[in-house]
Amino acid sequence: AFICLIQCNVLDSPSALIILPLFTMASRFISFGVRTASRQLLKAQSVRRWFASYPPHDVVGMPSLSPTMESGVIASWNVKEGDSFGAGDVICAVETDKATMDFEAQDDGIVAKILKDAGPSDIACGVPIMVTVEEESDVAAFADFVADAGTEAPAAPEPPVAASSEPTPPTPTPQPASSPAPVEPLSNGERVVASPLAHKLAKELGHDISAIAGTGPAGRIIAADVKEFIPMEQAVASTQTVAGAPAQAAMISEPVIGAGYKDYPLSESARETAARLAQSKRNVPHYYLTVDLSMDELINLRETLNGTVGEDEQIGVYELLLKAAGAATKAVPTVNASWMESVVRVYDNIDINVVVGNGDALYTPVIADVGSRGVKALSADLKAAVATLEEAEDDEGNAIVKELSSNFFKMGTLTVMNLGMYGVKSCAPIVTEPQAAALALGVIENRIVPSEKEDELYKESIMMTATMSLDHRVVDGAVGAQWLAAFKSHVENPTTLLL
């Protein structure tokens, strides 16, 4: 450009005093840009060479298996280095402060390196626990792989202490952070091993779990040890109402009285349930379908069945309705599915979560394989779940801590809740992810309905209203209507449940 200016005799004109400095500055900027780009290119090449030291791989962190989970303990590995896995396979069992849950693979792959062994060590969500590859020939390259600071995912942030902006008078029971701590250091440097329920009870009672002697296997602290523990500073043992995990809310139910209000502390299980429901309501596009059911034939069948079994094996209407829901799901299997972003996963087994308890004592144990099991077996499972939550006492009148089984924390494929016992006619429930449907049952009542006989206009019939909430991403309106039609048919013609 400078040579062109000379050829055009521009430099001989007065404007050269302005043009020459501009060209000088432009040339300096161009030179600086070229040097900077060269340095960035060399830096990018060095990064690529660093990643190129290993074959293509994925570093998998500790999963967050619930909305409030921040850390966990690997209870056991179901795979070992070199094993291949597919979508839906259980990689390992992760123990939180609430239950032991399965970590399922979302895609196919091969385990190249296990970075964290199973054991009592607490691992924050996001910390690398294993390396996966796509080719079996790449496994050997990761024999000495170490997750250094460059590859380790950041740990989950510590949640802030609640109630920072409002006045917080002293509470009788301190509220610890919600981060689970299955393993805590003792004052002498040793570590303590305890069950998730034992940690939960210790936190809510304000006990130092390191001061409690364990009576479980290998000195493991169980829930009964925490319940029977008497701190030295207490003159007498306080009597607590503990009916397994659900009644633990009573331990922290003392309200905090403020200026014109009362704050009732929530248990960790209540906060977990609230977070899960809020997330599901935000993410799932709900719609609702309602149908009225004639219960005359179902109640007659119940009376017939109860005449053939003993007093302790009596079958309730709820169990028959669960069986009808399972039969309807077999007829319309699309409802038995989950939204998986890129696919819709339809499940083979029909596992129904039933809602038991209320408030902080609300749980949803799963009744497994409802579609292929008999009503008597379903009734036994339901009664066992309810009995687990009922209060029990020993000979001295002290409450007995009951360990909750894993069924209380498993996610089924459909949820059925019965609100008829509270006199509620209908309810639109929240669909809990990853499920695609939830069914609410109303009160059973006598109603005047049109008669099918020619010589009478109306008749009295036993009726119930059922409302179904559905995920529109998985189940459209026509399919939802088909499911309700099948459910209505099985309820009003219950002999079809025997097929």
Image: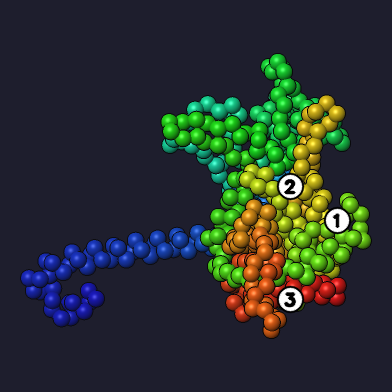
- SS for tag 3? helix
Whether residues under marks 2 and 1 lie with C-beta atoms below 8 angstroms apart, the answer is no
Q: Earlier in the sequence, mark 3 or mark 2?
A: 2
| C-alpha separation, residue under disc 2 versus residue under disc 1 | 31 Å
Any mark on residue 99, and which? 2
- Which quadrant of the rendered structure holds the N terminus? bottom left
Q: Residue furthest left?
A: 14
Which residue is identified by label 1? 314
Q: Earlier in the sequence, mark 3 or mark 1?
A: 1
Observer-nearest of 58 and 226: 226
Which residue is identified by label 3? 489
Residue name at image x 33 percent, y 64 percent: 31
Q: Compared to 203, does 93 lie above or below?
A: below
Observer-nearest of 96 and 257: 257
Instruction: Return the x and y of residue 375 as percentages of the image width and height.
Output: 84, 63
Q: Nearer the viewer, mark 3 or mark 2?
A: 3
Q: How many marks?
A: 3
Q: Is residue 447 visible?
A: yes
Asked where in the image residue 281 lies, by quadrant, the reply is bottom right
- Which quadrant of the rendered structure holds the C terminus? bottom right
Instruction: Return the x and y of residue 11 as percentages of the image width and height.
Output: 13, 73
The amino acid at mark 2 is Ala
| C-alpha separation, residue under disc 3 versus residue under disc 1 | 24 Å
The amino acid at mark 1 is Gln
Whether residues under marks 3 and 1 lie with C-beta atoms below 8 angstroms apart, the answer is no
Residue name at image x 22 percent, y 68 percent: 23
In the picture provided, is 143 more to the left or to the right than 480?
right
In the picture provided, is 11 more to the left or to the right than 61?
left
Q: Nearer the viewer, mark 2 or mark 1?
A: 1
Q: Check disc 1: other Cα within 10 Å, few if <14, some if 14-19, many if 20+.
A: some
